[in-house]
Structures are given as C-alpha cells and as structure tokens.
Image (cartoon, rainbow, N blue to C red):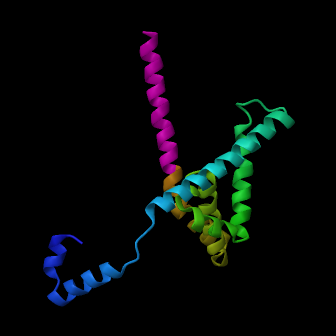
Amino acid sequence: MSNKKKKKLTPTQQEYQEFAKDREPKRPVFKNCIRAFILGGFICLIGQGLQWMFINYFNFTAETAGGPTSAVLIIISILLTGFGVFDHIAQWGGAGTAVPITGFANTMASAAIEHKSEGYVLGVGGNMFKIAGPVIVFGVFSAFVVAIVKIIIKWLGGM
C-alpha cells in the first residue's frame, strides 16, 4: 500500500493492514513459473505432434498443416472446457494455459457456457466477446501494423 493511502488510514486501520499482510499466504512464484512452463510446453508439444501427424498421414505441407492443427487444438480446448476439465488443468498450470491458442478458446467457450441461459444473441453472443473482443481487436490491429511496416520495407528496398 502506498504511503499516501497509509496516511489517510487511522492507526487502528494501519495496524490491521500490517496484521493482514503478515498473515497473507506467500505465493510460490518459482513453483508456479515451472508449472506454467511445463504445461505450456506440453500443450505446444501436443500441437507439434498434431502438425507432424497432418504432414505425415494426411499429406499436408509444413505451411498448410498449421490451420488444421490450430483447429484441433481449439476443439480439444472447447471440449475440455465444456466437460469442466480445463479449469482443473488451468488451476494446476496457471499461465501455461493462457499463452497458447487453447487459453483463448477456453475464454470464449466458458463465457458462452456461463451466459447460455440469457439467450443465444444477448447472452452467448453478447458476453462471449466481452473478454475475447479486445484480444481480437489487438490481434487485427497488430497484423495491420506489421503489414504496413512490411510494405514500407519492401517499398524502400525496391527504390
């Protein structure tokens, strides 16, 4: 808590803040980082295995195997979210599930499941993009900026 906020508190309130701070459980940051690394890596390993399978068994190229690999990971994530398994995995691995595409799919699916009772348009459609909408907007805007930079670099290189 900042010193400005502490100055506004009464001595009893300050004492209670210190008391509560002393009893707050310490977070195992290193252990959480290791778990996130392991789980995020495992999800990426599954994705790499799926991509290998599409290349070797379904005659995709390395460039074209990415789409179906992402789709399968999204479907698996949505199914695990629907069955309530993804929450347990995410609780163990923390941010490891949020980084890959599966975390985004989980966000969309869990919001849709939670607001299903409000109807498909106002409930599912309206609330599903409240969390994921900014991510989509940021992704589209970032892609636009990168494309503009690439065009400028190509244009300057051709001069």
Camera-nearest residue between 19 and 104: 19
Q: What residue occupies the far right of the structure in this picture?
A: 57
Residue depicted at x 18% and y 75% = 5
In the shown orientation, is residue 138 left or right of residue 9? right
In the shown orientation, is residue 103 left or right of residue 138? right
Q: Position of residue 137 (x, y in %)?
A: 50, 50
Camera-nearest residue between 114 and 1: 1
Please tell me whether residue 149 belongs to the stretch shown in magenta.
Answer: yes
Magenta residues?
137-159
Q: Is residue 47 above or below residue 103?
A: above
Q: Position of residue 3 (x, y in %)?
A: 16, 71
Residue depicted at x 58% and y 61% = 93
The overriding secondary structure of the stretch rendered in magenta is: helix
Residue depicted at x 19% and y 90% = 12
Q: Is residue 6 above or below residue 138?
A: below
Q: Position of residue 148 (x, y in %)?
A: 46, 30
Number of numbered discs visible in the structure rendering: 0
Q: What residue occupies the far bottom of the structure in this picture?
A: 12
* Residue 86 image-quadrant placement: bottom right
Residue 97 seen from this side: yes
Q: Position of residue 19 (x, y in %)?
A: 28, 84
